[in-house]
Image: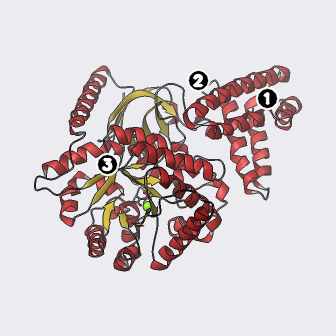
């Protein structure tokens, strides 16, 4: 048994087999083979297996997410069967007598470099695809049980150096028991996603990370940050009991479903949920959230291979609005950039991406992209109770500009006689110190504030939220952050608009009393945090 320690970022206990993600990202060995003909045969067999896996993935994706999403796997299959690609692999094996893994890897690098040099951003994005399909073939050649670089086919604990938000969001949640990463920080979007999914997660195990642990059984405790690899019987039994206890505690909280979120003295707070994609609504409803306080719409972009169309977005927003009925659904407009990078946007490399070209700054300078999303949002507003929320605001001018574009889109829809809610609420995120300082002027312009404490902490304390070495310096409990929250809430109330928190701090039970004292109107948290928070508020 091996015991490791990291930082627990999403509560719960998971017990299962370790699946090392990116296990095939190691150096591919070049070997000389005696029988190139047999090696070509080996390649063709692996290629065939990979094609079958892609077909299965395609069908599964079509069933779960619709045909649009499934097309990616058709494209991957075509790539794998492309005669130029196949000729290149076979040619290398036959002419240089190299092993199939090496031939596939060299071909992938060569094709990816060729795509990356093309001027169209669409073709540039194909570089990642060719690497992806090749990784799959190499994985099969190496005899891994699954060739899906990121996903085993049975339930497992993901083990990775690091995970990007797009890698995390593409995982099959029904198969992931938990996450453990060598790097990462508490407020990284990967950690946030784990909490949204209600999956135990531990980050920052650092040097203890080893790809050799692939396939071993692990016990992880997402609250304490402890991990046991290959646990002895006593430890396994202890954690099976703790897991049962934890699940029992969670099931007791179910009694709070349908009960009002009100303190003993009668103060009410609206408890909403944060989501990243439409399917999260199932756990929003299961945990009895009173609305959706933050739909991170950029995850629709992160999951896509190209700009999501108006129709695709409309369907996603409408689905959430319809499933939530009368309850409010706050959809944040595209918050791309910083750690949420999307290849097809062709964004330039930046030295300080958190201070760079991101979120509303992209939308205001690329209205053609912003308008597609706004059309989808407004059209969906006819099917439920949707509000639009603008991220990363630092000035009144940005709000004016964004509202002007919203009005233009409304005019277009009116001219086309397309229905939308004329009174759709427009609010902003308070996540920069500038927005707090300008809160009175901003409150006069919008219908609500939602405080993004993850970025507000980062920008107030000058602490990169992705940096795991900042420890106590990046403390969201800092009086500076708490005072900012109070200032923004008071400004909102002076202008008769509501103010909530949708950053991770909203779920911090040690601050619930303080938030009630400040008078926040709403707290939006991961679905699994709803009932524990309701319990705390009802006890207050
Ligand atoms: C925040 O910054 O607190 C927030 C809610 O937005 P995100 O975490 O997606 O940046
Ligand atoms: Mg933010």
How far is mark 3 from mark 1, CA to CA? 63 Å
Tell me the number on the disc at residue 32: 1
* Image-quadrant location for residue 480: bottom left
* 257 relative position to 353: left or right: left
x then y, percent, for residue 197: 41, 41
Q: 272 and 377: which one is in front?
A: 377
Is the residue 532 above or below the residue 417 in the image? above
How far is mark 1 from mark 2, CA to CA? 25 Å
Are there few (<14), some (14-19), or many (20+) residues within 10 Å of tag 1?
some
x then y, percent, for residue 130: 73, 41
Q: Secondary structure at mark 3?
A: loop
Q: Quadrant of ligand 1?
A: bottom left
User: Which residue is rendered at x = 33% and y = 22% of the image?
Assistant: 232
* Image-quadrant location for residue 105: top right
Q: What colour-coding does the image apply?
A: secondary structure
- Read off the residue under disc 3: 290
Q: Ligand 1: does it lie within 8 Å of the C-beta at label 3?
A: no
Q: Secondary structure at mark 1?
A: loop
* 36 relative position to 296: left or right: right
Identify the mark nearer the N-term, 2 or 3. Answer: 2
* Most distant residue in the left direction: 265
* 160 relative position to 503: left or right: right
Identify the mark nearer the N-term, 3 or 1. Answer: 1
Q: 77 and 376: which one is in front?
A: 376
Q: Secondary structure at mark 2?
A: loop
- Read off the residue under disc 2: 145
User: Which residue is rendered at x = 58% and y = 46% of the image?
Assistant: 303
Q: 332 and 417: which one is in front?
A: 417
């Amino acid at each position: 048994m091996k015991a490791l320690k990291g930082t627990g970022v999403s509560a719960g206990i998971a017990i299962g087999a370790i699946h090392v993600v990116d296990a095939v990202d190691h150096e591919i060995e070049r070997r000389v083979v005696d029988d190139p003909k047999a090696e070509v045969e080996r390649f063709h067999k692996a290629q065939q297996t990979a094609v079958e896996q892609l077909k299965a993935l395609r069908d599964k994706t079509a069933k779960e997410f619709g045909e649009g999403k499934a097309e990616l796997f058709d494209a991957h299959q075509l790539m794998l069967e492309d005669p130029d690609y196949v000729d290149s692999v076979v040619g290398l094996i036959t002419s240089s007598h190299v092993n199939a893994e090496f031939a596939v890897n060299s071909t992938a690098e060569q094709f990816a470099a060729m795509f990356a040099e093309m001027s169209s951003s669409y073709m540039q994005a194909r570089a990642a695809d060719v690497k992806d399909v090749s990784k799959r073939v190499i994985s099969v050649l190496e005899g891994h049980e699954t060739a899906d670089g990121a996903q085993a086919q049975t339930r497992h604990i993901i083990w990775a150096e690091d995970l990007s938000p797009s890698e995390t969001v593409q995982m099959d949640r029904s198969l992931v028991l938990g996450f453990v990463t060598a790097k990462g920080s508490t407020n990284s979007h990967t950690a946030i996603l784990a909490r949204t999914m209600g999956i135990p997660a531990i980050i920052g195990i650092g040097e203890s990370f080893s790809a050799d642990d692939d396939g071993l059984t692990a016990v992880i405790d997402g609250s304490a940050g402890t991990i046991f690899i290959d646990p002895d019987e006593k430890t396994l039994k202890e954690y099976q009991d703790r897991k049962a206890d934890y699940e029992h505690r969670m099931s007791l909280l179910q009694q709070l479903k349908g009960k009002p979120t009100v303190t003993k003295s009668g103060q009410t707070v609206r408890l909403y949920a944060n989501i990243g994609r439409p399917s999260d609504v199932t756990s929003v409803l299961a945990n009895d959230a009173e609305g959706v306080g933050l739909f991170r719409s950029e995850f629709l972009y992160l999951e896509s291979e190209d700009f999501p169309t108006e129709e695709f977005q409309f369907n996603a927003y409408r689905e959430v609005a319809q499933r939530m009925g009368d309850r409010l659904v706050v959809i944040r407009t595209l918050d791309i950039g910083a750690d949420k990078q999307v290849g097809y946007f062709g964004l330039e490399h930046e030295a300080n991406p958190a201070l760079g070209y991101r979120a509303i700054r992209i939308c205001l300078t690329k209205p053609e992209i912003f308008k597609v999303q706004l059309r989808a949002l407004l059209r969906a507003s006819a099917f439920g109770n949707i509000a639009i929320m603008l991220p990363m605001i630092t000035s009144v001018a940005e709000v004016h500009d964004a509202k002007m574009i919203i009005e233009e889109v409304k005019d277009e829809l009116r001219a086309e006689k397309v229905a939308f809610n004329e009174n759709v609420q427009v609010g902003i995120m308070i996540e920069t110190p500038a927005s707090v300082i300008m809160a009175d002027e901003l409150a006069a312009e919008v219908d609500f504030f939602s405080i993004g404490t993850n970025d507000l902490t980062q920008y107030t304390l000058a602490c990169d939220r992705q940096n795991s070495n900042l420890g106590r310096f990046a403390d969201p409990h800092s009086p500076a952050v708490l005072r900012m929250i109070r200032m923004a809430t008071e400004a909102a109330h002076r202008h008769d608009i509501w103010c909530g928190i949708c950053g991770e701090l909203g779920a911090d039970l040690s601050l619930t009393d303080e938030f009630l004292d400040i008078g926040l109107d709403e707290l939006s948290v991961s679905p699994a945090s709803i009932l524990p928070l309701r319990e705390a508020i009802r006890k207050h």
